[in-house]
Amino acid sequence: MKESPKHIKISEFSYPLPDERIAKFPLPVRDRSKLLLYRHGEVSEDVFTSLPDYLPADSLMIFNNTKVIQARLHFRKETGALIEVFCLEPALPNDYALNFQQTEHAAWLCMIGNLKKWKEGVLKREMLVKGKPLTLTAERGACHGTSHQVDFRWDNPEVTFADILEVFGELPIPPYLNRRTQESDKETYQTVYSKVKGSVAAPTAGLHFTPRVLDALREKGVELEELTLHVGAGTFKPVKSEEIEGHEMHTEYISVNRSTLERLIAHGGKAVAVGTTSVRTLESLYHIGVTLLNNPDATEEELHVRQWQPYEMTPEEAATPAADALQAITEYLGRHGMETLHTSTQIIIAPGYEYKIVKAMVTNFHQPQSTLLLLVSAFLHGDWRKVYDYALAHDFRFLSYGDSSLLIP
């Protein structure tokens, strides 16, 4: 593997993004957005409904089926102060599905808005859930970096934490939209194929897909598969350090079914990724597989992909074929009688990274000086400015609700 990208200066990944170029709302019809095409160094444009025309018939396209949860909870103290509790990831139990099914108590790691006004005491909120009155309380616990553990309790054993979020929570749209969440966001800020609750941000490349585009892909002969990566609030965290070595990547939780791994192996370990979340998951799978080839008895903790792990591989490890690495994961699942790999990743993909599985990518236009821009630059071997200069010059809309691109290096 090439030298570590730790000393890359984030200032080299800047470009002018006027506020008016940030799409505040999506287009009325999702798949009518513009599609920038980058193919082997050439840039052109089309409309998103034409996406199937640019993919080979035998491609495998991978989507992230995570669903955004209504993760923002508002409480008012008796003093009148408004406290926002933003659920980031489950703490007790720490499994998303189990946590959502809890019926009297659930704890989450949360970011707290107006923290200085909530020094102590229990926050309360009365609400109606499933037609029954209920009191929800929130108690602040230990601090973990920039977040706190918050214990939620409620007095109706027929109501789950998922029910409470559904009624009481607010969808957390990106902070750079500079507007309040609207009722329409509940639909427009979810992909049409979202299924597994757990994200606090949408995998936005997927927002352009409609049933008709998915049908057209199938008719073309493109195979469609899904995996799950729950997107954390860290996805919006700008790189504050001068060099990227100083930026700590957030941990993201992934799950991939054995059937998806087998489909990937059948395609020689090659895929078209929809969105940077799918990219991070697929590339993390490669490094998990290499870990297992070196240590078939690796523990669950040892399968976690560390931030700089890809850059620490030996030349022999880096030469591992993608299909072999994926095969090692299916064998691991077989040995443990598991159908799904559940693990986590902190992978940072930056110039110097060698892509192993992703051969083409559908993605939106990302913020300046973001880790997502680093990921795109690594994919295009440094040619990201050509894409962004074109998009800025040709009236493309930027960020979550903006237009899309298909990148084929």
Image (spheres, rainbow, N blue to C red):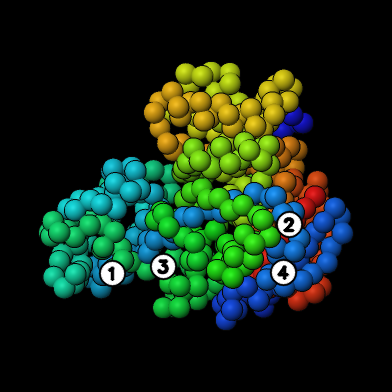
Taking the view exactly as shown, the residue that stands out farthest to the bottom is 28
Task: Identify the mark at residue 167; answer none if there is no mark.
Answer: 1
Query: Dot 1 surroundings within 10 Å: few (below 14), some, or many (20 or more)?
Result: few
Disc tally is: 4
* CA–CA distance in space, label 1 to label 3: 11 Å
Residue 275 coordinates in the image, percent (x, y): 61, 55
Secondary structure under tag 1 reads helix
Please tell me whether mark 2 or mark 1 is closer to you in this view.
Answer: 2
- Which residue occupies the foreground of this view, 217 or 321? 217
Residue sitting at x 81%, y 73%: 393
Q: Quick one: label 4 or label 1, which is nearer the N terminus? A: 4
Q: Quick one: label 3 or label 2, which is nearer the N terminus? A: 2
Residue 198 coordinates in the image, percent (x, y): 41, 54
Q: Which residue position holds label 3?
A: 171
Task: Identify the mark at residue 50; answer none if there is no mark.
Answer: 4
Q: Are marks 4 and 2 in contact (CB under 8 Å)?
A: no
